[in-house]
Amino acid sequence: MKRRSILNAGTLVLLLGAQQIARGAGIVAVRLWPAPDYTRLTIESDTLLASKQQVAADRMTLDLEGIALDPALRELVGKVKADDPFIAGIRIAQAGPNTVRLTIALKQAALPQVFQLQPVAAYQHRLVVDFYPPRPVDPLEALIAERMKEQDKPLAIAPAPAPAIAAAPVPDPLGELIAQQTQRPPRAAVQVPASEVAKPAVPALANAKTDRLIIVALDPGHGGEDPGAIGPGGTREKDVVLQIAHLLRERINNMSINGNPMRAFLTRDADFFVPLGTRVDKARRVQADLFVSIHADAFMTPTARGASVFALSQSGASSSAARWMADKENKADLVGGLNIKAQDQHVMRAMLDMSTTAQINDSLKLGSALLGEMGTVGRLHKGSVEQAGFAVLKAPDIPSVLVETAFISNPEEETKLRSSGYQEQLADALIKGIERYFSRNPPLARNRPL
Ligand SMILES: [Zn+2]
């Protein structure tokens, strides 16, 4: 449906006639994707759009050349959300006979990246402006901030403890992790020597006798410019998988394994595009014990149905269907829109060359446990874990699986995927699978701090 409306908009521009075309690019659509990591502004046009920008502390001006002021472009003004972390507002004006100027008021000093994307999938040419914070969002700090929000009680400072504190059971593993990772005292302990600081009071974990926090990275597929698969009824994969991830997060955060509390970390918690490599990097930054990518894809035929689970492969795909699925998923960066120049290619290559045999073995075990539970909720597409070269499963040190919860291209499964009842059942099955995996494969006694 989305594809059709985009094509129609494109056709409309073409039908406006030679006069418009002679002026240059016609605007097809404008979109804004606000998120804490970065806000993206996309201007889609039927031909390449030339632009020049100037950046100041409180605003950015973007001159679009070879176009006239267009109602489609004006829509940007109304699309700015009050809670956008970066953009306060947008003004649009004709700045010359063939130049339209966007003045983008900024809420914080942002580092804009401007780049072009070639036509791909349902999209024509895209001019993209990403507004990044001067200091990138650290996934670990994001996890901490989320945890802080959950705490009902104000943080308390206890009387100065005896020096033997280090040997005592740690009541708050995440607090400990925070302190060690950030090399800074916890928030409550500003200007108090670290050795004299008590950990924040956390009722939920107060009795946990452990120094080990189990972190499960949940990776809702797609997002932002990349809707993922779209069902015959218009359901978008990116929306459904985020809902399922939220339900699974609730369950994970209420669970512990042998007294070790679990925490979920989401690689995206809003509707914005996260590159595949960044998803892996985020999971590694929080030293996740597991990585579960959640999807609900379309297949070549609408009759395809059932859940499947995939692990990485070092030598080819386990079936042509698995290869097809991996190729499809790996295109997410093209559709979502990656600023290739801004990516650190060296880091990526070094990471992908690392051995992954042990990771794949663990991933297959995790995948089997998940499949076993998912089979009790609904039909399975295939009863065993499939393997192919999924880019998002390439963390060399984290058991990683990609779960296709159902085929959104199947009308019956699309209806189920939309229902909160089925989403709950899926989340229940996934948490049981994770529990089953950990009961047979206890988390390694890994020393978290680097
Ligand atoms: Zn997908």
Image: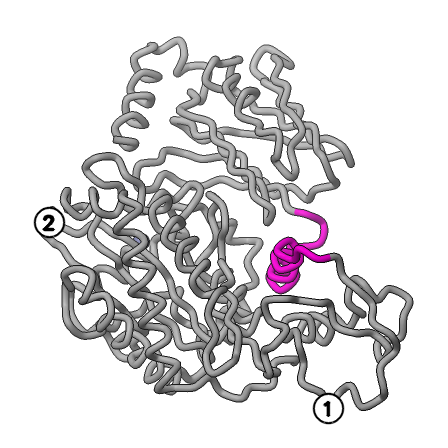
Q: Secondary structure at mark 1?
A: helix
Q: How many marks?
A: 2
Q: Which mark is residue 103?
A: none
Coordinates of residue 185 in the picture (x, y in percent): 80, 70
- Amino acid of disc 1: Ala
Q: Residue at x 20, y 61 (%)?
A: 377
Q: Residues within 10 Å of mark 2 (few under 14, many from 20)?
A: few
Q: Quadrant of the N terminus?
A: top left
Magenta region: 133-153
Residue at the outermost left position: 303
The answer to whether residue 80 is left or right of residue 61 is left
Q: Residue visible at 57% across and 24% down?
A: 64
Of mark 1 and mark 2, the one earlier in the sequence is 1
**Horizontal and vertical percent for residue 119?**
36, 38
Which quadrant would the C terminus be assigned to in this image? Answer: bottom right
Please indicate whether residue 32 sits to the left or right of residue 141 in the image: left
The colour scheme used here is one colour
Picture quadrant of residue 317:
bottom left
Q: CA distance from mark 1 to mark 2?
A: 59 Å
Q: Is residue 266 magenta?
A: no
Q: Which residue is mark 1?
A: 167
Question: Quick check: 399 above or below 426?
Answer: below
Q: Secondary structure at mark 2?
A: loop
Residue in front for this viewpoint, 207 or 354: 207
The amino acid type, in three-letter code, at marker 2 is Thr
User: Can you tell which of label 1 and label 2 is closer to the viewer?
Assistant: 1
Residue for badge 2: 301
Residue occupying the point 52% across, 13% down: 68
Reply above or below: 246 against 393.
above
Verify CB contact (< 8 Å) between mark 1 and mark 2: no
